[in-house]
Image: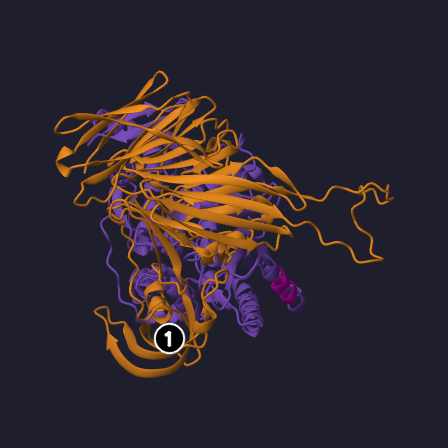
Chain colours: A orange, B purple
C-alpha cells in the first residue's frame, strides 16, 4: 500500500453544485505533481517524485482547493501513478508437482515483490519492507496474514502486516521493518525455488541479516532461514585508543572480546476474519500445556497499553504455534526451533491480533554468525495438543487428482508415523517421512494424490499416546 | 455557607495536533521546541506538551472576554510559528489515523474545599453527557468512522475520561481520568475532561463560559440532589447516546425522552448567573446557540468533509488541515449548514448484545459501556435469563459470554 503526497499545479475544471442539504461544493479536475510519500516513514520509488497526473477532487465551499495546496492520494489513486499499466501478477497456486517464482507488484506500491508458489500456496515476499512475508495464500486465495496498516508510535512505526523479522538490538522500532533488502539471484529447480535477501544494518553496527526463503514442491509451507553475522567493530586508527579496555577508564590492558548480542524474533499480523471473528484462535504448547488464546476484536480499535503478562507465554518446548479458524478450519502453523524460542506474545486487542515469537539472546563473536529458522505451514484443518500438531492441507488439483499434504509436528518420539485416511469411497494409509528444517526442528510429512470424489477425508495419526484427527474437504 | 467558588475563575488545557505536510503528527521534540518559542513570545501563556500534542494553557482568568483575548493572541502566534515551519494545525477530538485522542479540558475554580468540590463533581453527572454531545468532534478515529460522533468519549479517551461514579465527599480520594475530576488535591479547580478537542477559539471560550456557568449553578443549587440508581443508569446511557448522535441525541431525562438540544437550552439559562460573574451573557454564546438551533456539531462538519474524501482517513486529514487554515471555518460552516433532526436512539442493550460472540471476555463489555459494573452485571444477567447468552469462565476463573444463535 502506498499513499502519495502531491502538490496542486493547476485547476483544470471547476463545477459548482449544491447538495440536498444546501451545502455548496465544487468539483475539480486537478493537475498535480508528486512531492513524495504521504507516510513519512515509508519511501516511494525515486522515479515517481515529480511525476504529474490528473485527479478528481471535491471540496466544500468556501474552502476551495488552491494552486500549491498539498493533498494526499489514496492507495488506488497512488497505484495509478506508481504502476499505471503493469499487469497484475498471478497470486494463485501452481499445478501439482510444480514450483514457480513470479515477480510483480501485487500491492501496487511501486516496488516489485517476489511470489513463490507451489500447489498449496503462494507466498509474497516484500524486499522493500524488511523482506517480510507479506502474504501467504492458499489455493482458494485466502490469506493467512493481514495488512492492518496501523499507526503505532506516532508515525515512527506502522504495523504493515505479514510476518516481519525483528532484531531487538536494532532499536525500537529499528530499521528492519521499513528497509530495503538486497535481493540475491534466485534458484529455481523442479523441486524448489529459493531466494536470498540481505541487509547490512546501521544499528547494531557491523551486523548483517540474511534471509533465505524456500518453497518446495509438495511441502505446504515456506521455510525461512536467517543468518545474522557480525563483522566486528572498526579497528581504531593508529594513535587512537581502542576503546576495548575493561571499561574502568584506567586501561588494564585486557582486551574485551568484540561480540554482538543478537535477539531475533518475528512479528506477525495473522488474519482474523469470519463471522463471528472470535472463532479465530491461537493454540500454542507452553509450560507443558496447550494454551488457547481466542481473538476478540476490541470495541473501539486498538487500546494503548503495554503488553502485559497475560499476553506472554514461555516454556515453548515443542516449538510451534497454530492460528486456526474454528468455523472453517483454515489454519497456519508457525514452526520454530524447539527450545530456542523463548517467548510467544499474543495480543488480541489490535484490530487484528499481533503475535511475536522471540528467541533467546545469543552472542556472536567478531567474524561469526548465528542462524535461526522458521516455517509457515498452511492448512485446511489442524489439531494441536500440548506436544503435537497435525495438519492437513489441500492443494490445487489437476488431472491426476487433488494433492493432500499431511504434516505432523511432535515433541514425542515417533518413527515413520502412519496416517489412516478414511475417504468417501474407502480407506487408505500414508507413511509420513521425517524432514529436518534447519533451525525450526523436524516434521513428518507426506503428500498424496486423491481423486476429487474421495473427499471429504478423515485423517488420523498417532503420536505417542495421542490420537490426532483432521477432516478435509476438497 | 459561603460560595464554593471564591472567586469564580476559569481556564483550560486544550490539546491540539501539529501536523507535518503529509498529515502525520510532528514529533514530541518538535512540540517542545514550538512551546519554547511560544513561551518566549507570550510569557503569560503556559503552553506545553502532552505526548506529541501541543497543549494551550492560558492560566486562570476571572473574565471570559480576557480569556478570549488571550486565546486569540495565542492562536495568532501559534499559527504564525507553524506556518514558518510548513506545519499545519489540526484541532479535532482525534487524529483520524494516528493514536491517542485529543481533548479540551475546562477548569473551573477557585476551590479549596474537598467535600464541596466532590459534591459539585456528583452534581455534574447529569450535565457531562449534554456537554459531550455539544463538544462532539471525533467522528473519524484510527481509520474508523460511522458509529460515533465522538469516538474519543465512546472509548473513554483511552481511560483519560472515564464515566464518573458518584463519590462520597468524606471517603473519596484524589483520582484522575474521569469525565469530571476534582483537582483540589494538587490544584484549585474542578475539571471537565469529557470534551473533545475544539476547532475554534471563539467556541472554546464559549464552552468554558457555559461549563463554568453550569458548574456554578450546581454549586449554588444542586449540591444536595439525590440520585436514584435508575437515574444514574439513564445518565450513563445518555452519555452513550451523546457519543453516537451528538446534538441529534434524545436523552432520558426525569423519566421522559428529551432532545439534548432542549436540555442544553435549559442549561444555557441556568448558566447565566455564573457567566455574569465572568462578564459574559447568554447572547454572547453565539456559536453554541447556533449549534443548538441547528443540531450541528463539529463532528457533523468533519463528516461532511470525510464523505467528500471517499472515507479515506489520510485524504481526509490533509483536507481538514487545509480547511482549518481558516480559524473560523466551523463558524462559517455553521452559517451554511442545515438543521439536523433529532434521532430516535438505538438501544444500548442491543449494542451490548451485538458485541457478544464466542467467549467474549467480561472486560471487553466493560470497556464498551458507560454503565457501572454492577449495572452491566444486571444487563448480562437479563440476557442470560432470556436465553440470549451463556456465561462461562476461562482458565483463570474470569467471566466470559457466548451468544446463543
Binning the other alpha carbons within 10 Å of mark 1 as few (below 14), some (14 to 19) or many (20 upward) gives some
Residue B206 lies in what quarter of the image?
Answer: bottom left
Q: Magenta stretch?
A: B32-38
Residue B385 lies in what quarter of the image?
Answer: top left
Q: How far across and how far down the image is residue A16, in percent?
A: 26, 79
Q: How far across and how far down the image is residue B74, in percent?
A: 57, 67
Residue farthest front in this picture: A190
Report whether A58 appears left or right of B26: left
Q: Secondary structure at mark 1?
A: loop
Q: What residue is drawn where x is 62% and y is 59%?
A: B32
* Chain letter for the residue marked with disc 1 in the picture: A
Report whether A393 appears left or right of A229: left
Q: In terms of depth relative to the viewer, which is nearer, B191 or B50?
A: B50
- Residue annotated with mark 1: A63
Q: Is residue B169 visible?
A: no
Q: How far across and how far down the image is residue A97, in percent?
A: 28, 44
Residue farthest top in this picture: A465
Quadrant of image for the N terminus of chain A: bottom left
Q: What residue is drawn where x is 79% and y is 49%?
A: A243
Q: In terms of depth relative to the viewer, which is nearer, A332 or B335?
A: A332
Report whether A454 appears left or right of A8: left
Quadrant of image for the C terminus of chain A: top left
Q: In the displayed structure, would residue A209 be above or below residue A405?
A: below
Q: Is residue B374 visible?
A: yes
Q: Residue B89: within the magenta?
A: no
Q: In the displayed structure, would residue A223 be above or below residue A44?
A: above
Report whether A227 appears left or right of B376: right
Q: In terms of depth relative to the viewer, which is nearer, A28 or A48?
A: A48
Amino acid at each position: 500500500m502506498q499513499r502519495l503526497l502531491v502538490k496542486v499545479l493547476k485547476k483544470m475544471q471547476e463545477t459548482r453544485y449544491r447538495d440536498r442539504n444546501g451545502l455548496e461544493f465544487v468539483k475539480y479536475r486537478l493537475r498535480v505533481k508528486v512531492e513524495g510519500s504521504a507516510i513519512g516513514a515509508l519511501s516511494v520509488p525515486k522515479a515517481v517524485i515529480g511525476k504529474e497526473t490528473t485527479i478528481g477532487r471535491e471540496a466544500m465551499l468556501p474552502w476551495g482547493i488552491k494552486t500549491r495546496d498539498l493533498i494526499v492520494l489514496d492507495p488506488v489513486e497512488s497505484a495509478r501513478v506508481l504502476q499505471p499499466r503493469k499487469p497484475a501478477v498471478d497470486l494463485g497456486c501452481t499445478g501439482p508437482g510444480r514450483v514457480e517464482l513470479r515477480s510483480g507488484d501485487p500491492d501496487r506500491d511501486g516496488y516489485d515483490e517476489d511470489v513463490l508458489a507451489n500447489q498449496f500456496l503462494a507466498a509474497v515476499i516484500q524486499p522493500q519492507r524488511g523482506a517480510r512475508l507479506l502474504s501467504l495464500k492458499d489455493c482458494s486465495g485466502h490469506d493467512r496474514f493481514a495488512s492492518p496498516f496501523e499507526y503505532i508510535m506516532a508515525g515512527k512505526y506502522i504495523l504493515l502486516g505479514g510476518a516481519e523479522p525483528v532484531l531487538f538490538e536494532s532499536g525500537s522500532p529499528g530499521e528492519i521493518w521499513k528497509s530495503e533488502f538486497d535481493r540475491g539471484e534466485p534458484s529455481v529447480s523442479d523441486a524448489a525455488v529459493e531466494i536470498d535477501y540481505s541487509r547490512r544494518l546501521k544499528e547494531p553496527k557491523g551486523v548483517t541479516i540474511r534471509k533465505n526463503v524456500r518453497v518446495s514442491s509438495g511441502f505446504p509451507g515456506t521455510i525461512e532461514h536467517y543468518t545474522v553475522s557480525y563483522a566486528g567493530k572498526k579497528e581504531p586508527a593508529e594513535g587512537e585508543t581502542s576503546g576495548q579496555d575493561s571499561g574502568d577508564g584506567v586501561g588494564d590492558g585486557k582486551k574485551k572480546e568484540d561480540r554482538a548480542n543478537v535477539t531475533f524474533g518475528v512479528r506477525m499480523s495473522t488474519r482474523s476474519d469470519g463471522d463471528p471473528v472470535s472463532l479465530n484462535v491461537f493454540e500454542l504448547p507452553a509450560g507443558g500445556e496447550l494454551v488457547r488464546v481466542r481473538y476478540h476484536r476490541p470495541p473501539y480499535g486498538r487500546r494503548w497499553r503495554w503488553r502485559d503478562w497475560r499476553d506472554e507465554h514461555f516454556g515453548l518446548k515443542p516449538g510451534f504455534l497454530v492460528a486456526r479458524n474454528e468455523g472453517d478450519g483454515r489454519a497456519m502453523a508457525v514452526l520454530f526451533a524447539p527450545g530456542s524460542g523463548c517467548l510467544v506474545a499474543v495480543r488480541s486487542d489490535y484490530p487484528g491480533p499481533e503475535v511475536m515469537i522471540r528467541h533467546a539472546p545469543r552472542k556472536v563473536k567478531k567474524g561469526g554468525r548465528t542462524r535461526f529458522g522458521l516455517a509457515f505451514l498452511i492448512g485446511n484443518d489442524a489439531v494441536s495438543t500440548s506436544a503435537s500438531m497435525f495438519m492437513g492441507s489441500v492443494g490445487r488439483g489437476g488431472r491426476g487428482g487433488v494433492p493432500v499434504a499431511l504434516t505432523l509436528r511432535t515433541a514425542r518420539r515417533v518413527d515413520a508415523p502412519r496416517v489412516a485416511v478414511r475417504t468417501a469411497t474407502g480407506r487408505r494409509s500414508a507413511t509420513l517421512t521425517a524432514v529436518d528444517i534447519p533451525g525450526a526442528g523436524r516434521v513428518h510429512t507426506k503428500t498424496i494424490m486423491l481423486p476429487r470424489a474421495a473427499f471429504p477425508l478423515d485423517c488420523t495419526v498417532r503420536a505417542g499416546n495421542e490420537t490426532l484427527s483432521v477432516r478435509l474437504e476438497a | 455557607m459561603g460560595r464554593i467558588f471564591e472567586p469564580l475563575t476559569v481556564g483550560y488545557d486544550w490539546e491540539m495536533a501539529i501536523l507535518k505536510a503529509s498529515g502525520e503528527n510532528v514529533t514530541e521534540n518538535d512540540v517542545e521546541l514550538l512551546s519554547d518559542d511560544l513561551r518566549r513570545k507570550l510569557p503569560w501563556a503556559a503552553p506545553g506538551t502532552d505526548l506529541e500534542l501541543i497543549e494551550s494553557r492560558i492560566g486562570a482568568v476571572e473574565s471570559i472576554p480576557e480569556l478570549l483575548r488571550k486565546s486569540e493572541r495565542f492562536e495568532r502566534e501559534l499559527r504564525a510559528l507553524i506556518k514558518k515551519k510548513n506545519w499545519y494545525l489540526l484541532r479535532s477530538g482525534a487524529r483520524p489515523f494516528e493514536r491517542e485522542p485529543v481533548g479540551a479540558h475546562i477548569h473551573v475554580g477557585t476551590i479549596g474545599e474537598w467535600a464541596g468540590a466532590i459534591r459539585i463533581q456528583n452534581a455534574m453527572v447529569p450535565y457531562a453527557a449534554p456537554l459531550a454531545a455539544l463538544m462532539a468532534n471525533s467522528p473519524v478515529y484510527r481509520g474508523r468512522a460511522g458509529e460515533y460522533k465522538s469516538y474519543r468519549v465512546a472509548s473513554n479517551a483511552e481511560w483519560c475520561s472515564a464515566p464518573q461514579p458518584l463519590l462520597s465527599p468524606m471517603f473519596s480520594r484524589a483520582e484522575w481520568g474521569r469525565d469530571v475530576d476534582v483537582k483540589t488535591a494538587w490544584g484549585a479547580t474542578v475539571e471537565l475532561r469529557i470534551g473533545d478537542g475544539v476547532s475554534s477559539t471563539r467556541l472554546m471560550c464559549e464552552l468554558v463560559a457555559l461549563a463554568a456557568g453550569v458548574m456554578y449553578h450546581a454549586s449554588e443549587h444542586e449540591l444536595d440532589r439525590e440520585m436514584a440508581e435508575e437515574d444514574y443508569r439513564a445518565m450513563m446511557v445518555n452519555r452513550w447516546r451523546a457519543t453516537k448522535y451528538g446534538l441529534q441525541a434524545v436523552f432520558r431525562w426525569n423519566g421522559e425522552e428529551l432532545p439534548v438540544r432542549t436540555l442544553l437550552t435549559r442549561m444555557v439559562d441556568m448558566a447565566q448567573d455564573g457567566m455574569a460573574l465572568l462578564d459574559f451573557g447568554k447572547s454572547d454564546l453565539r456559536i453554541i446557540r447556533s449549534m443548538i438551533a441547528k443540531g450541528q456539531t463539529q463532528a457533523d462538519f468533519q463528516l461532511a468533509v470525510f464523505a467528500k474524501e471517499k472515507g479515506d482517513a489520510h485524504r481526509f486529514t490533509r483536507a481538514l488541515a487545509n480547511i482549518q487554515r481558516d480559524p473560523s471555518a466551523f463558524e462559517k460552516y455553521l452559517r451554511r449548514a442545515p438543521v439536523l433532526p433529532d434521532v430516535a436512539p438505538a438501544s444500548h442493550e442491543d449494542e451490548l448484545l451485538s458485541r457478544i460472540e464466542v467467549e467474549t471476555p467480561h472486560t471487553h463489555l466493560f470497556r464498551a459501556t458507560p454503565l457501572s459494573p454492577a449495572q452491566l452485571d444486571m444487563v448480562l444477567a437479563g440476557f442470560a435469563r432470556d436465553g440470549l447468552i451463556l456465561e462461562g469462565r476461562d482458565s483463570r476463573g474470569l467471566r466470559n459470554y457466548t451468544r446463543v444463535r
